[in-house]
Each structure stands twice: as C-alpha cells, then as structure tokens.
Image (cartoon, helix red, strand yellow):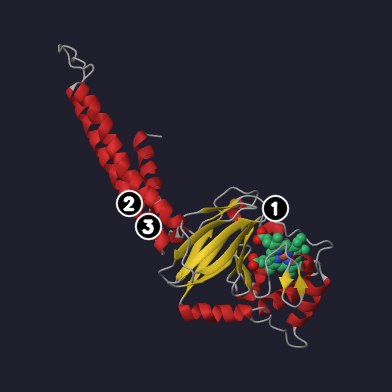
Amino acid sequence: MPRYRLWLLTVALWVAGCGGPFPQTTLEPRSDFGSVIDQLFTGIFWWAAGVFLVVETLLVITLIRFRHREGRPAPKPTHGHTLMEIAWTLAPAAILVFVAVPTVRTIFATAGEAPADALKVDVIGHQWWWEFRYRELGLVTANELHVPLGRAVQLSITSADVIHAFWAPPLGGKRDAIPGHVNRIAFRADRVGVYDGQCAEFCGASHANMRLRVVVDSDSGFGRWATVQLAGPAAPAAGTLAERGKAVFARSACIGCHTIQGVSPGVIGPNLTHVGSRATIASGLFPNDSAHLASWIADAPALKPGSLMTRMKPPLKDDDIAALVAYLASLK
Ligand code: HEC
Ligand SMILES: [Cu+2]
C-alpha cells in the first residue's frame, strides 16, 4: 500500500472517533460529583498541555540548532550546571503541588458523607446485573436506578459474589462493589435524563454485558415512579393470556429465583414485581419488548453468555413462553 493511503486510513480512523453520540462520556457531567471531577481533569489537562508545549519546543529548537552540519565542530556539552539543575527540580515539584492540592481536595470532597436528608440506595452487584434497594421506601428494583433531580443521593455499594464496579460516567466516578464491604458515593443530579453506565471491574464472562441505566426524574416524576413501584403487582384479568402466564410462572422454576411480590420469593435473579415498567431487560442489554422477553425466557445464556438464568429443563413450550411474556409485560 502506498504510504499516503496508509496515512489517509490512519487519519480517517482517527477522525471516526469523533462521531457521536457518547452515552458514557465523562466530559459532560450531569451531577455535582461529575462536575468536580471534570474540573479537576480540565485543570490537570492544561498543566500537562503547558509542560508538553515547553518540552517539545525545546526539543525542536535543539534538534534544529545542534544538528550535524558538514564542517562544523561538534557542539560543546554542558556538565554540572547548578542553576539549571535546581530549576528543573523545583519547576516540576511546584507543578506537582498545583496538581496534588486540588486532587486531594476532590478526593476528600467526593468521599464525604451525604447530607442527612439524602435518598439512600443500596447497590448490589451480581454476576451480571445490578440490584437497587431503597431502604427507606421499602422498594427493590434492578438495573434501572431512578433518582430525583437535585436531591442528594447516597449509594452504598457492595457485591453478592465477585468484585464489580459501579460506574455511571455522567454522574461521577466509579466505585468498586466488593463482597462483604460497603463503598459509598454521593451525588446530586442536575439534569433530567437517562444515563448509561457499566460495570467497570472485570467480573467474568458477561462483564461487558453488565450495564445499568440511571434515570434522573423530576421530583414529581420520581414520586410517581415510587408510588407505582410500591404498589403490589398488577393482577391479570380473568381469562387473559397474562392470567395463564401467571399460572405458568407459579408452577415453573422461575419462582425459585425471582421475587414477584405476593407470588414468589426467589432472590437469585432480579425482582420482577414491576419488570413491565422497565425499559430494558438483562441489565440494559435489550429493549423490554415481547420478542426479546420471549427469547430471553427460552434461552437466556444464548443472549448473554454465562448468564446465571440457566436454560429451563425441560424447555418451556412456545405457548407457555407467550403466556409468560404477556404476564411479565403486564407487571407495570
Ligand atoms: C436459576 C435461577 C433462575 C431461574 C430458574 C429463572 N431465572 Fe430469570 N433471571 C435469573 C437471573 C440470575 C437473571 C439476571 C440475568 C442477567 O441479567 O444476567 C434473570 C433475569 C430475568 C429477567 C430479566 C429481568 C431484568 O429486569 O433484567 C426476566 C424477565 C426473567 N429472568 C424471567 C424469568 C422467567 C419467566 C423464569 C421462568 C421461566 C425465570 N426467569 C427463571 C435467574 C433465574
Ligand atoms: Cu464487571
């Protein structure tokens, strides 16, 4: 390949990285926690840019001035120049102080306790999904974390199995989810929206598929959501496909792993009491529609490698799956 084409290819690939959207960017912070980290990053970036500029300028000047030229004597090297040595020790030390002070300040600010009126949520990482427990509200959900706009939220993060890390980039830094240990973050979201997140610590086969979504609701929107979640599950009308689905659910292995309030007590998989109200299933991997629900119930590990929702044995019949889908979709 001629060299210019290689260059063209390189530049094209490089520029392709500029195409949006960027659902997991940290550069557009949407909370106070995200903003302080972003400011710290910007400050350090400019210090690094300044150092780069000075070093590269000196390097280029040196290359041009002292390059080999026919008939010119070799330049004289400098040895043991005290002033220069003091200068290039002090200058980086001073720059490091300017970097260290705001860094340490940010670490303390973001590790601090949340105010007393913060909404407290327990976050539990599982292979490969997220459980969210709102202790004060008595509410349990999975994979889609709802928080109210502008109110302090404190997440207490832990794990049920291996080490995971909770990370919703627009809302702030990542925190490890460690079994037997609780790590905290506190933030105040400052814009309504849906923000994508991701497990950020390798945790096995479907680590890359262990996503999450944070839904920042308006204050009244959050209240409405919580009211719906606190209500018992919808009871399917008599004679409907959903009612048949409820019966299939109650006599299948599902009940051993899933909670549906008043129907089953399982705790291995996500709470399904209001699964129909979620926009996605399988920790943000698929839209929550009939087609995806049906293929998920038929064979979850085929959609999500290693999924601990094993294939049902014996396999469910197609009309049972259709009934289950109708039932789960009705659980708004
Ligand atoms: C062996 C335990 C187990 C059994 C049995 C089981 N599940 Fe699951 N289920 C899980 C686990 C674990 C997950 C989370 C998987 C993931 O996202 O990686 C899950 C996820 C789901 C989800 C997605 C929920 C969400 O919010 O993402 C649905 C829906 C579901 N199961 C329905 C069913 C139905 C219906 C049955 C019975 C036919 C069933 N499950 C049987 C363990 C089980
Ligand atoms: Cu992971």
Task: Tell me the kind of residue under disc 2.
Answer: Thr
Q: Indicate left or right for 79 with 246 as reference.
A: left
Above or below: residue 318 compared with residue 126:
below
For disc 2, the marked residue is 42
Q: Quadrant of residue 10?
A: top left
Residue under the image location 74 percent in, 74 percent down: 324
Is ligand 2 less than 8 Å from the beta carbon at label 3? no
203 or 14: nearer the viewer: 203
What is the x, y in percent for residue 302? 70, 57
52 or 227: nearer the viewer: 227
Q: Quadrant of residue 80?
A: top left
Foreground disc of the pair 2, 3: 3
Above or below: residue 52 compared with residue 207:
above
What is the quadrant of the C terminus in the image? bottom right
What is the x, y in percent for residue 98? 30, 44
Foreground disc of the pair 1, 2: 2
